[in-house]
Amino acid sequence: MNLARIARELEIDESEYIALLRLFQRHTTEDLETLKRAEADSQLDAVYRAAHSIKGASATLCLWPIHDAASEICTDVNEGISKTIGLRVADIEAELSSLVRLLDGNEGETADGA
């Protein structure tokens, strides 16, 4: 993932994009916990709301693998399918872990890559 390129596409500064990604990480971690609790309690409406929140935020930030997994959860809930939710949650968690590693690797870098 090229943070500088995506920031340019979004017409924001790379440091602003990184700050937004950190905020996304925190909120998505919370949404995932909510989603998992709701799934365990068979509260599919709450699962949908949490997945929809992740879907919207990830699309805004061009995080398409996360968006796609969250979108699949929303579709599955709408279709009454719950057996694949855990798989999609694992996909989101893996992508989020990759994002955190990428962000941690960018600590201290400037927008020009120095």
Image: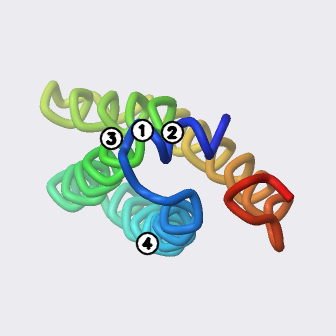
Residue for badge 4: 27
- Per the model, the C-alpha gap separating discs 4 and 3 is 14 Å
Q: Residues within 10 Å of mark 4 (few under 14, many from 20)?
A: some
Whole-percent x and y of residue 73? 33, 36
The disc, 2 or 3, on the residue closer to the chain's N-terminal end is 2
| Amino acid at the residue labelled 2 | Ile
| Amino acid at the residue labelled 4 | His
Nearer to the camera, 6 or 80 = 6
Write the residue at 80% across / 53% down. Answer: 113
The disc, 4 or 3, on the residue closer to the chain's N-terminal end is 4
Residue for badge 3: 59
Nearer to the camera, 11 or 1 = 11
Mark 4 or 1: the one toward you: 1
The disc, 4 or 2, on the residue closer to the chain's N-terminal end is 2
- Per the model, the C-alpha gap separating discs 1 and 2 is 7 Å
Q: Is residue 98 above or below residue 23?
A: above
- Per the model, the C-alpha gap separating discs 4 and 2 is 20 Å
Q: Are marks 1 and 2 in contact (CB under 8 Å)?
A: yes
| Amino acid at the residue labelled 3 | Ala
Write the residue at 31% across / 47% down. Answer: 60
| Amino acid at the residue labelled 1 | Cys
Residue for badge 2: 6
Q: Quadrant of the C terminus?
A: bottom right
Mark 4 or 3: the one toward you: 3
Q: Are marks 4 and 3 in contact (CB under 8 Å)?
A: no
Q: Are marks 4 and 2 in contact (CB under 8 Å)?
A: no
